[in-house]
């Protein structure tokens, strides 16, 4: 079947890109956001202005990796703080421990806007776990790859509640 343009307009398309320079390419649909790996190279490219594109800018979602070693903690804390000072406020975490990069011990964020999302590596497998991500401050979450059809249907049924950060399009 040909590409369904109506469906493309109702779905929030997040396109994973390896580098900011790719954001300037044409895509079959207009992405709602670009999901960008949180790497030193991408941060340096962002600081050089490689992310500036013509037209309405598509939001960047900075995707933290599933594993951050203890030796890397200071670098991540510093890099996140610098990006937030530059106006970046959308991040995707891959582990709940990464919330510590964004909140102090009292659970308070800095005053700048902040939008956190969860990666599929959070392994969300039921509506209770999905609801817990909302209480932790996440606005949305990719569901686990291990979720079967019945589990997905159950979470979609609960996805319209205020406690659930499930976004379906």
Image (cartoon, rainbow, N blue to C red):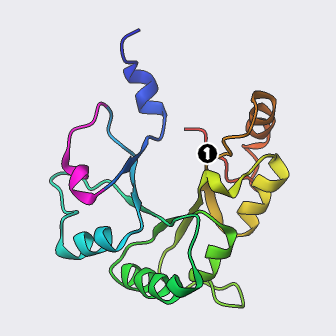
Residue 115 vertical placement versus 17 (above, below)? below
Q: Quadrant of the C terminus?
A: top right
126 sits to left or right of 15: right
In the image, residue 25 lies in the stretch drawn in magenta: yes
Label 1, residues with CA under 10 Å away: few <14, some 14-19, many ≥20: some
Task: Indicate left or right for 99 with 6 as reference.
Answer: right
Q: Residue at x 37, y 79 (%)?
A: 83
Which residue is situated farthest in the left direction here? 54
Judge left or right: residue 69 versus residue 10. Answer: right
Front position in the image: 40 or 51: 40
Give the residue drawn at x 38%, y 72%.
88
**Which residue is most to the right?**
128
Q: Residue furthest top?
A: 1
Q: Quadrant of residue 2?
A: top left
Reading the image, the residue beneath label 1 is 167
Whether 141 is drawn above or below 31: the answer is: below
Q: Quadrant of the N terminus?
A: top left
Vertical relation: 162 (above or below) 47: above
Height in image: 154 above or below 142? above
Q: Is residue 162 magenta?
A: no
Can I make out residue 5 in this image? yes
Q: Quadrant of residue 42?
A: bottom left
Q: Position of residue 140 (x, y in %)?
A: 61, 54
Q: Which residues are magenta?
A: 19-28
Q: Position of residue 35 (x, y in %)?
A: 42, 54
**Secondary element at tag 1:** loop
Q: Is residue 63 left or right of residue 27?
A: right
Q: Position of residue 99 (x, y in %)?
A: 63, 75
Query: Can residue 111 be seen?
Result: no
């Amino acid at each position: 079947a040909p590409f369904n343009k109506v469906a493309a307009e109702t779905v929030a398309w997040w396109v994973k890109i390896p580098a900011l320079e790719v954001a300037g390419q044409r895509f079959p649909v207009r992405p709602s956001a670009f999901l960008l790996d949180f790497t030193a190279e991408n941060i340096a490219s962002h600081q050089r202005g490689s992310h500036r594109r013509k037209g309405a800018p598509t939001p960047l979602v900075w995707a933290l990796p599933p594993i951050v070693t203890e030796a890397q903690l200071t670098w991540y804390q510093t890099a996140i703080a610098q990006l937030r000072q530059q106006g970046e406020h959308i991040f995707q975490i891959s582990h709940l421990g990464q919330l510590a990069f964004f909140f102090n011990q009292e659970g308070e964020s800095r005053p700048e806007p902040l939008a956190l999302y969860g990666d599929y590596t959070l392994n969300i497998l039921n509506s209770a776990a999905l609801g817990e991500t909302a209480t932790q401050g996440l606005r949305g979450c990719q569901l686990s790859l291990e979720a079967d059809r019945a589990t997905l249907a159950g979470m979609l049924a609960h996805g319209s509640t205020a406690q659930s950060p499930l976004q379906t399009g």
